[in-house]
Amino acid sequence: MNLILFEQAFDRIQLSKDDPRAAHLRKVLRVELGTLVFVGFVNGLRARAKVVALEADGSVALEVVGTEPAPAALPLTLLVGLPRPHTAKRILFEAASLGVQTLAFFEAERGEPSYARSSLWQTDEWRERLRLGTEQSFGTHVPEVVMYPDLQTALSQLYDRPVRVALDNYEAAGALAAMLPQSAGSGVLAFGPERGWSPNERDTLRRNGWALAHLGPQVLRAETAVVATVAAVASQLGYWKDQTATSL
């Protein structure tokens, strides 16, 4: 991880030997007294912290020595037909790494209902994937996750976004770049389930004012399509132009 994420801000904290973050500091980063590490506070600031104690019992104490704003969340919601748990884990991680604002999943007509009952969603495993993605990205924004029972219910909650594009290899009206304005505020990008959109879902998207676009002739894995689409949209709409590297 490139940054250690904490739920609450602190000036000084003592991590017990049972805390995975203490183990990471000792065994992976091999910190010593005075070592500076990057930490972040969920949806808050990024900080530099100094190791001020390495106790014999395995605990580690950190003290914040400086803070700065973390990268802003991208004003994008990803609407995704609920995929297999293994694929969902990758999408959760990559979406958090990219800094998207919200992840919305829906049970698609060609999806498998049992996916929603997997251990990924019945435990806190999905939260862990978001946390790991956020730490990897050197950010602090953890995307909100929303679940919808079907596509129409989801669209009825997302109707007011200025950019509404669904990715589709087969009935797209054109390439993604052609469907985007030069700049815009918030947007929603929709991805069908791994078996693709149903004819009814395509009609539902069009009826609700969504544009169907493609990324090119290749058929991409779901998680690859998510990364490629978010990167292309963020670049074209200028979401990253004011982002800067750390000053700490």
Image (cartoon, grey):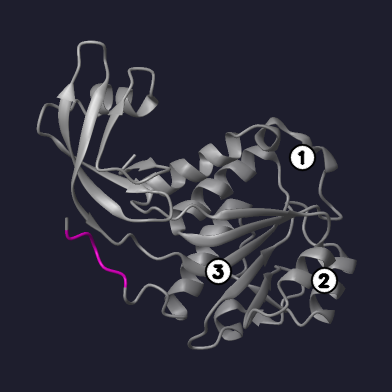
Position of residue 88 measured from the top left corner of the image (x, y, whole percent): 63, 45
Instruction: Please name the residue that numbered disc 3 is placed on.
Output: 76
**Which image quarter holds the N terminus?**
top left
Can you give x and y, in whole percent of width and height, for residue 75 in the image? 51, 71
Q: What residue type is labelled 1?
A: Tyr
Question: Residue 62 sits in which quadrant?
Answer: top left
Q: In the rendered structure, does residue 169 fall within the stretch colored magenta?
A: no
Give whichever of 201, 37 is nearer the camera: 37
Spatial CA span between label 2 and label 3: 21 Å
Camera-near label (1 vs 2) is 1
Q: Mark 1 points at which residue?
A: 115
- Quadrant location, the C terminus: bottom left
Q: Nearer the viewer, residue 64 or 228?
A: 64
The span picked out in magenta is 243-247
Q: In this view, does 245 lie to the left or right of 240?
A: left
- The tag earlier along the polypeptide, 3 or 1, is 3
Mark 3: give few (<14), some (14-19) or many (20+) Cα within 10 Å. Answer: many
The image shows residue 225, relative to residue 76, as above or below, that is: above
Labelled pair 2, 3 in contact (Cβ < 8 Å): no
Residue drawn at x 48%, y 86% is: 183
- Placement of 70 over or under 189, stated as above or below: above
Instruction: Compare residues 5 and 135 and report the one nearer the observer.
Output: 5
Apparent side of residue 151 relative to residue 169 in the rendered image (left or right): right
- For residue 176, what is the image quadrant? bottom right
Q: Name the residue under label 2.
A: 202
- 2 vs 3, front mark: 3
Is residue 221 visible in the rendered structure shown here?
no
- SS at mark 3 in the image: strand
